[in-house]
Amino acid sequence: MRQSFTWWSFTLGREIEPASFLRQAAAAGAQGVEMLPQAYWPLARDAGLKIVTETGHKLEEGFNDPSRHAALQAEMRRKIDAAAEGGVEAVIVFAGDRFGDGSDERAIEACVTGLGPVVSHAADAGVRLLIELLNSKVDHPGQQCDRTAFGAAVVRQVGSPALRLLYDGYHMQLMEGDLSRTIKANLDLIGHVHTAGAPGRRDLDDRQEINWRGIAALLRHLGYDRWVGHEFIPRGEPIAALRNAIALFDAVEHAA
């Protein structure tokens, strides 16, 4: 497993110097950074960090609405080309908020149809797309891709290795729980994992309800070798919190 961190969550509300922060994150054991402003991409590379993910479009306005397909496809092609040029490994996409009758069946079909050409473009560019699972209970009311089954159906029906699930344990703990069994059942579809403590989206410690050490051991046991991105908001000093999270996953790797 390779470990990264999300720029937004570790810098939220903090005054930091970007180049120094990225160097400190690398020294703490991070191998990549996610959702980093494009102006900082050269700084990440100078720090020895991979630029792992970029957000493709507004999460409220996604591929579940056929009327948006043409505009989203054009936007995503631009994002994919920029990612390929900048060395970004993956671009995140979203189903969008429910509308109309809110039918999941209709929305899945629309996502498959709309994402098809974009996935082909990504495959040609050497970039992976990740459809993210989000909670609609707290952070993203109305979001349609709020269960693993929805995202998994889209990925299976698109049928390309260039589209995979971004499995966010924080979001799915709020929506459905049963993380271990769900990860086992869908491992072949998961291209990326995000961590955070639930319910508060804080550190991976004993003040929250997910056993992240157990999840880390499960991923190691299953042979998961892709990215684990830490997307929590640290209670205290962010580099120390990042170091602790990385150490938690490293411990199970070294115990293998």
Image: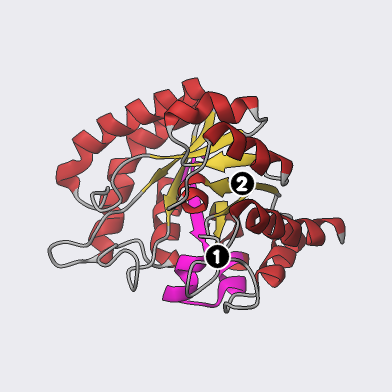
Residue 16, given in percent of the width and then of the height, sits at 51, 42
The magenta stretch is 159-183
Residue 25 is marked as none
Q: Earlier in the sequence, mark 2 or mark 1?
A: 2
Most foreground residue, 207 or 89? 207
Amino acid type of the residue that numbered disc 1 sits on in the rendered structure: Arg
Q: Quadrant of residue 215 in the image?
A: bottom right
Residue 89: x and y in percent read: 54, 34
Percent of width and height locating residue 94? 34, 50
Depth order, front residue of 224/198? 198
Q: Is residue 121 left or right of residue 104?
A: right
- Is residue 191 located in the magenta-colored stretch of the structure? no
Of badges 2 and 1, the one in the foreground is 1
**Residue for point 41% across, 46% down:** 158
Helix, strand or loop at label 2? It is strand
> What residue is at 31 percent from the left and 63 percent from the top?
140
Residue density around tag 2, few if under 14, some if 14–19, many if 20 or more, within 10 Å: many
Tell me the amino acid under the disc marked 2. Answer: Ser
| Residue 45 visible in rendering | yes
x, y percentage for residue 62? 27, 49
**Relative side of 141 to 34, left or right:** left
Q: Is residue 193 above or below residue 72?
A: below
- 73 or 231, which is in the foreground? 231
Q: Secondary structure at mark 1?
A: loop
Q: CA distance from mark 2 to mark 1?
A: 18 Å
User: How many numbered circles does the render carry?
Assistant: 2
Question: Are the residues tagged 2 and 1 within 8 Å (C-beta)?
Answer: no
Residue 235 marker: 1
Residue at label 2? 4
Whether residue 211 is situated above or below residue 153 in the rendered picture: below
Residue drawn 60% across the image and 57% down it: 237
